[in-house]
Amino acid sequence: MKGRRQDGRNILLCMGKTIASKARSHTVALGALTCAFTAPVSAQSLTEDIASMVTGGTTRIAMRYRFEDVEQDNALDNATASTLRTRLTFQSAVVNKFSVAIEADNILTLGPDDYDSFALDKYRGNHSVIADPVGTEINIAAVKYALSETSSMSLGRQRYNHLTQRFLGSVAFRQNEQTMDSFSYNRVSGNVTVDYSYLWNVNRVFKGSKTSAQITDYDSNSHALLINGKESWGTLSGFIYALDFDNALAASSISYGLYYTGTFGAFTLNASYAAQSDYGDNPISYDTDYALLEGSTKVGTVTLLAGYEVLGSDSGRVGFATPLATLHRYQGFADLFLATPANGIEDAYLTVSAPIGKVNLSATYHDYGAEETSADYGSELNIVAGYVLNPRVNFEAKFAAYESDGFAVDTDKLWLTMNLAF
C-alpha cells in the first residue's frame, strides 16, 4: 500500500513538472498521458494497472453527417459542404484514483465540397466560408487524478464548457471542436464548486490537414477561474478569464464578472455582467463591459424566451471580445458577429419553441445594433427543427436568414444534420 502511495506522489510530481515546463508543442497532450506510467513502479504492477484501466473502460463511436449551404449577397460563390465526422472515444476505468480519456476525430467530405474552410486551397477567397476543414486529430487526451472524494485534477488536452459557454466553450457545433492543452483543478464543497484551469495551448476549429489562413493554435499563457454557489434562490457564479496569447496579442484580455440563474415558479431568469480590459501584451489599452438579461416561461407546451445582450465598446475603438466562447450560440446562427464590431453590439431577441409530435421546433428573431453609435446592423431569423428517432439516431434541420441594414451582407444558411451513436 505504501508503494502505491509513493507511485501516486511520483505521478503527481511528473504532472507538476509538465505544467512548470509550459511545453507548447501540439504533442504535449499526448505526452501528458505518459505521466501516469513513468513513475518507478514494478513491471507487474504497471501491467496490471494498465490492463484494469483498459478492460474496465468504455469505448464509443459517434458519427455526424452534415450538409451545409451558404448564400451571401456578395461577389463570393455560394458554398456547399457535405461532411462526415467520425469520433472514437475511450474512457478508462479508475485505477488507484487515476483515469485516462482519449478521443480522436476524423473529418472528411462526402460529395459536394465547394466551400472555403480557410484552408489554403483553390476555394480560399472564392467561396463563402464554412469552417469545417478536413483532417484527423486527437481531440481529447488527458489524465485525471482524484485527490479526494470532492476534488480532482487533470492534465492534457481537454474540453471545457463553462456556464452557457459565453466565455469558454468547445464550439461543439462545428465538426472540429475547440479544445485546450491544459491543467485543471476541480473541488466541490457543499453547495460551492471551484474550477481552475491553466491553458497553454488552444486548439481552434480551423485546424485541418492543410495549412490554414487562420491561426489554428493560440500559444497561450491563460487562466480561467469559475466559482459556482447554489442556493434556494438560484445559482450565482463568479468568473475570471485572463487570456494571454503570444501569437494573437490583440485577442489578449482579462474579463471578470458574475452570472445568475434562478427559477421563480414558471419563470426563469438569467442575468450576467462582466468588465473587460486589455491584458498581457495587447498593444491597445481599453476598458469595456458586458451585460445580459434573459427571461423565459412556459405557456402550455410553448416556451417563450426574451433576452437582451450587450457587448460594449471603448469609444468605438475596441469591442468586448470572447475569443474562446462557443460563438455560434450567440447573436444568430448566421455567424456574422463572431468578432465583436469595434462599436460593440446590442442584440434584442425573442424565441418561441414547442414540440409538435416528436419534432421539437424553435424560432428566434434577432435585432442587432451598435452599442456605441446606436446604428442599426440588421436583423436575423433562426429556425430549428429536431427529431429523435431513438437514443442512437437523431436529426436536425437549421435555417438562418440575416438581413443587413448596413453591417455585412444579406446571408442565408441551411444545415441538415444526422447523428449516429454506438
Image: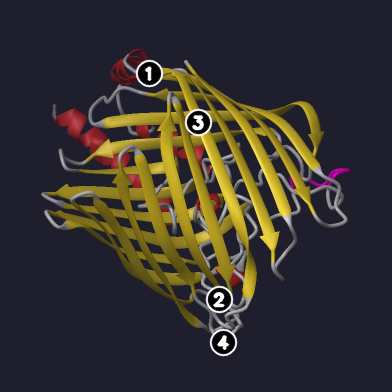
C-alpha separation, residue under disc 1 versus residue under disc 4: 53 Å
N-term-proximal mark, 3 vs 4:
4
In the rendered structure, which amino acid carries the disc numbered 4?
Ser
SS class of the residue under badge 3?
A: strand
- Circle on res. 315: 4
- Please state the extent of the stretch shown in magenta in the rendering: 117-123
Residue 121 part of the magenta segment = yes
Which residue is denoted by mark 2 in the rendering?
281
N-term-proximal mark, 3 vs 1:
1
Which residue is denoted by mark 3 in the rendering?
386
Q: Magenta-highlighted stretch: main secondary structure?
A: loop
N-term-proximal mark, 2 vs 3:
2
In the rendered structure, which amino acid carries the disc numbered 1?
Thr
**Residue 215 visible in this rendered orientation of the protein:** no
SS class of the residue under badge 4?
A: loop
Q: Residue at x 57, y 58 (%)?
A: 219
Q: Is residue 56 above or below residue 290?
A: above
Q: Residue at x 25, y 36 (%)?
A: 8
